[in-house]
Amino acid sequence: MSKLGRTAKERTALVRNLASQLLWYGKVETTHAKAKEVQPYVEKLLTKAINTYADVEEITLVKKDSKGKEVEVKATKDGVKKLAARRAIMAKIYDLQEVKAFNEKKADFKARTADSRHPLVDKIFNEYAPKYAARAEELGQGGGYTRVYLTGERRGDAAETAIIELV
């Protein structure tokens, strides 16, 4: 046994799950020890995304339209560095999927999620990376993407609880 009273496999799974939930929801309540364990893990993932999110290439594709005529279409794809970072991040988190909203129609849900096979990774690169890159430009420093608040002791086992959230 080692940190957090778990074997290495169990601890890795726990940290991956907490990191995935934190990146998806932006905030997670857990024990203080687990929050301290997941904080550098998430910060490293976000730093990797921030350093590579702007690496995109514009390409032109030749497609046939409805009349059979060839048309050039411009598209963007990930550059080499962004693709490598995307794959590395996908290896370190669990792939969470979008959930249909309560009053959302099935067709609307399919239209909203049609272009995204990995919504959590897309959220990291499309929302968090530009936001934190702008924050780093503004403050002149990188890092510090998460914050841990102590919330007192848990009833029952008196474990020190904390809330970890994205800044």
Image (cartoon, rainbow, N blue to C red):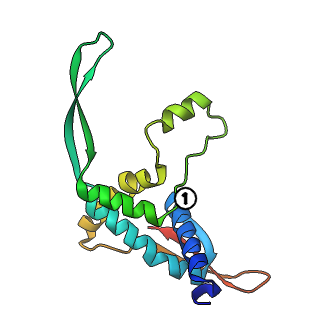
Q: Secondary structure at mark 1?
A: helix
Q: Residue furthest bottom?
A: 2
Name the amino acid type tagged 1: Tyr
In the displayed structure image, the side of residue 142 where residue 88 appears, left or right: right
In the displayed structure image, the side of residue 155 where residue 120 appears, left or right: left
Percent across and percent down for residue 60 are 19, 33
In the displayed structure image, the side of residue 57 where residue 3 appears, left or right: right
Vertical side of 104 occupied by 99: above or below: below
Vertical side of 10 occupied by 119: above or below: above
Picture quadrant of residue 153: bottom right
Q: Please tell me which residue is depicted at 38% across the width and 72% down the height of the picture.
A: 44
Q: Please tell me which residue is depicted at 33% across the width and 66% down the height of the picture.
A: 48
Percent across and percent down for residue 139 are 27, 70
Which quadrant is the C terminus positioned in? bottom left
Vertical side of 67 occupied by 79: above or below: below
Q: Residue furthest right?
A: 156
Which quadrant is the N terminus positioned in? bottom right
Residue density around tag 1, few if under 14, some if 14–19, many if 20 or more, within 10 Å: few
Residue denoted by label 1: 25
Percent across and percent down for residue 4 are 61, 85
Q: Residue furthest top?
A: 67
Vertical side of 6 occupied by 21: above or below: above
Numbered label tally: 1
Q: Please tell me which residue is depicted at 41% across the width and 51% down the height of the picture.
A: 122
Percent across and percent down for residue 128 are 39, 58
Q: Please tell me which residue is depicted at 54% across the width and 33% down the height of the picture.
A: 110
